[in-house]
Amino acid sequence: MRLTFHGLSRRLAVGTGGGAAVEFLQEPSIVRQVQRVQVVDSHTAGEPTRVVVEGGPDLGTGSLAERRERLDRDHRSFCSGVVREPRGSDVLVGALLCDPYDPSCEAGVIFFNNVGSLGMCGHGAIGVMATLRHLQRITMGKMRLDTPVGMVTAASLDDDRFAVDNVESFRHAAGVTVEVAGHGPVSGDVAWGGNWFFLTESSPCPLELANVEQLQQFARAVRCALASAGVTGEDGAEIDHIELFGPPRSGGDARNFVLCPGGVYDRSPCGTGTSAKLACLVAEGKLRVDATWRQEGILGSIFEARCSVVSDAVRGRPVIRPTIVGDAYLIAESTLRFDEADPFCWGLPAEQP
Ligand code: PYC
């Protein structure tokens, strides 16, 4: 069964060229253009997702990758209005539901954060599943979601638990060293897990909540060093997620700290970052296929992950299909109002680039 979002989107389109409801203020002669967007908020292992279920922009037809480009090009204000202050915060990840392009999928989704769209989002896909189940739009336990970087399969396991079979993931480069201002040489791997990651065991301090400012500064410096040194993902893709690893503290196999594009850190263990980690572990022969890896995030919350090997021989590197399992809880169902008279209608500037 395919879910339809396009018709809903058109009726309450928001952003450039969207339709708007008219409201009367006190007297019938004062008229305001106010656009409304229905959202459902959840958090997955502590990291929030805001799913736009009605009132998003019409991105037209074509692949999800093409529609992602249109979202970034033409609807930036919509995205920042949904996720940034004053309605949200820089930490929020938005999820725009749309019609799938891949006919085998039941729904499409494009994730975005405080500075633009994301290829995939593991915690977000879990949040989407929790939302769709709450809205009774999932009639079966499993569904296929079309994303800008490929198809993912998601399943509702029990009450609050969901599994996501992520896009194919791989290690792109091993043992890359860059000179990081104020910290010296830092080595790590470059890997794809639906977004591009630099994974390192270097850190200026233990991976603890009390140290997040220091961790953020260090991870930002690493990201700058990679860009200055011209270290990229495949085809020159920017490495926009930095993932630090340290010893576990809450019963996992390792703890991570993930800096996302936009300068904020992932409160969850990061689904795409965990996928990238699995790809590196498999490439090093350190993880058996189907063994469970328990990835701890900075809050101590855990994603359980495992993978199958899709191919041993693509450009000499293993390609895996990771599965990420985590818990999500619904926290709000709201109607966002976009009032043309509000000077901050489309959100405050992001804290960090
Ligand atoms: O869970 O993949 C993830 C993710 C990416 C950015 C924030 N969360």
Image (tube, rainbow, N blue to C red):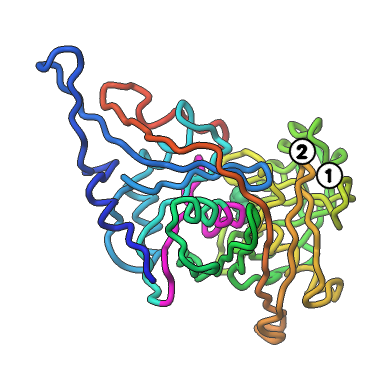
The answer, for residue 227, to whether it is visible in the render is: no
| Part of the protein shown in magenta | 104-126
Quarter assignment of residue 274 = bottom right
Reply yes or no: does residue 182 show up in magenta: no
List the residue tagged with mark 2. Answer: 215
Which residue sits at x=29%, y=51%? 9
Mark 1 and mark 2 in contact? Answer it, CB < 8 Å: yes
Q: Give the amino acid type for the residue marked by disc 1 in the picture.
A: Ser
Quarter assignment of residue 172 = bottom right
Q: Position of residue 313 (x, y in %)?
A: 69, 87
Mark 1, ligand 1, within 8 Å: the answer is no
Q: Position of residue 3 (x, y in %)?
A: 37, 64
Q: Secondary structure at mark 2?
A: helix
The alpha-carbon separation of the residues under discs 1 and 2 comes to 7 Å
Residue 19 appears left or right of 92: left
Which residue sits at x=67%, y=85%? 311
Q: Position of residue 161 (x, y in %)?
A: 65, 56
The answer, for residue 204, to whether it is visible in the render is: yes
Does label 1 or label 2 sit earlier along the sequence? 1
Numbered label tally? 2
Which residue sits at x=89%, y=50%? 247
Mark carried by residue 154: none
List the residue tagged with mark 1. Answer: 203
Q: Farthest residue in the bottom direction?
A: 313
Q: Is residue 193 above or below residue 205?
A: below
